[in-house]
Amino acid sequence: MRKRDPIQTQLISARRSQILDAATQVFAKKGFHRATIKDVAKAAKIADDTIYNYFKNKTALLLGILDRLNETPEREAHFTQASKMDINDWVHSYIKQRFETLGPEGFDLFQVVLSEILVNRELCDLYSKQVVQPTYDLAGRYFRQWRKEGTLKSLDPALAMRVIAGMFLGVLMQRLIGDPVLEARWDEVPDVMAEVILNGVMEAKHA
């Protein structure tokens, strides 16, 4: 098989990022349905047809944004790092990093994505298959390893991971609807979430 020129690979990656940056801005501002490929091309400062060389349609664009927000290609490295750190420190730093990944446009974009996933069956299935399930599979492997080593409680990995993901999504939902406590103390949320995940909310009883 012929190897791809590394410079060409970098150029393709840069162009994809350019298009995804533009799509993120456009979708966050106009919403998924009102936005057009033409809008994205204009924001990216490229010809309309160029986008189709990288993304099949608007759904593929939105899926690309979700994949980037999820940091799917980097997840293996994230979890590998956990084996070299104290699990408590890693959970705190990992959750903080996930919140930071949202960026300044993250809340508007999350609202667009959520509303579209609820009504777009194709996007929902693709997101589950290409982004969510691979992440669960990877996390589950490490979860089982930590449970075997005695680092974690004997919980079912599939359920535990979904409960943790649900906590993250639930906090984002409350922030989207304007919860004043979350708006005022958003920087504190990652550490509080990490503490709840690691230690629960019950005060430890001393003998």
Image (spheres, helix red, strand yellow):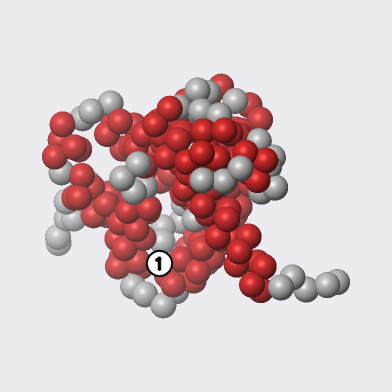
Residue at 57% across, 46% down: 46
Residue at 59% across, 60% down: 13
Decide which of 186, 63 is in the foreground and name it: 63
Secondary structure category for the residue under label 1: loop
Left or right for 178, reference 26? left
Left or right for 120, reference 154? right
Residue 80: tell me if it is visible: yes
Q: Quadrant of residue 47?
A: top right
Q: In this view, does 60 lie above or below 193?
A: above
Instruction: Categorize mark 1 by other alpha carbons within 10 Å: few (<14), some (14-19), many (20+).
Output: few
| Percent x, y of residue 186 | 20, 44
The N terminus lies in which quarter of the figure? bottom right
| Percent x, y of residue 183 | 18, 37
Decide which of 119, 167 is in the foreground and name it: 119
Residue 60: tell me if it is visible: no
Q: Is residue 47 above or below residue 123?
A: below
Residue at 65% across, 45% down: 50
Decide which of 14, 105 is in the foreground and name it: 14
| Percent x, y of residue 116 | 52, 27
Residue annotated with mark 1: 151
Instruction: Name, please, the residue furthest toward the bottom.
Output: 84
The C terminus lies in which quarter of the figure? bottom left
Residue at 53% across, 23% down: 33
Instruction: Name, please, the residue furthest toward the right.
Output: 1
Tell me which amino acid carries mark 1: Thr
